[in-house]
Image: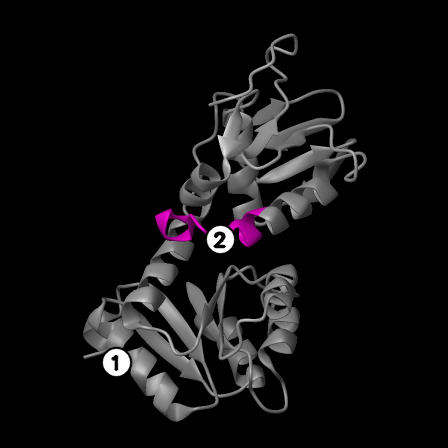
Amino acid sequence: MAGSRSSGPLILAVDDEEKILRFIRMNLELEGFHVISATSGLEALQRVRTAFPDLVLLDVMMPEMDGFETLRLLRDFSDVPVIMLTVRSDEEDIVRGLELGADDYVTKPFSVRELTSRIRAVLRRQKPFLPPEAAILKIDDYLSVDYNLKEAIVGGKRVKLRPTEFRLLALLIENAGWVVPHETLLAKVWGPEYREETNYLRLYVTYLRQKIEPDPSNPRYILTERGVGYRFVDFRHPQEERTSQ
């Protein structure tokens, strides 16, 4: 049965509990995914290197090497999307996972509908972003954006952006000069399932500012409209001020 669905996205499920792996495999294969598994962090790293999955479901609470350490080592050699699975929903754990490079976080127990929805949303975010007419868009003498390589050019140096960081930056630039509401950014960058996940948006704006701003504590490009959303400076019409979308 699994073999007949091998043309679908390949998911690597990592958990030390076999019953959880069976639950994930059975339900995701019914949804058209192909699922392989690992029962430890070390095995997960090996499988990523050999199987090249489209996405990894990574349990946090594993013996010997937990999910955080596994993710840290994984990010040394792979940008594969990762969804963390955990019985804990503490914001500190969520922040830690996202800072290490996780793309999303699902708390156990989870429904099949929630899990598949999150997987599809993360996979959608990996699709290529259509560049503007110019592959490299110059904002000013300090900042440019390379749409082909998904990099920022900051003070003459290239800075790699994660897929989600790039999509967020591209959306803000597309609406330069306009305030883009929190809900709109979340829906268009993460997916409609994420409209209430303002902590994700706050974290990724912080990441972007740390990468592209001359002084992240006093941003030049990504401006906060408190209680509403964010606005990228209007570099096309610098004399105009726009306060709503």
Give percent across and percent down for residue 129: 45, 38
Q: Earlier in the sequence, mark 1 or mark 2?
A: 1
Residue at 53% of width from left, 77% of height from top?
A: 88
- 21 displayed left or right of 151: left
Residue drawn at x 55%, y 20% as measured from the top left: 243
The crowd level at tag 2 (other Cα within 10 Å; few <14, some 14-19, many 20+) is: some
Q: Position of residue 187 (x, y in %)?
A: 41, 43
Residue 26: assigned label: 1
Asked if residue 200 is among those painted magenta in the image, a careful observer would answer: yes
Secondary structure of residue under mark 2: loop
| Residue occupying the point 58% across, 50% down | 162
Left or right: residue 22 versus residue 185 is left
**Magenta stretch mostly in which secondary structure?**
helix
Which picture quadrant has residue 62? bottom right
In space, the residues marked 1 and 2 are separated at their CA atoms by 29 Å
- Within-10-Å neighbours for mark 1: few <14, some 14–19, many 20+: some
Q: Quadrant of residue 20?
A: bottom left
Query: Which numbered marker is on residue 197?
Result: 2
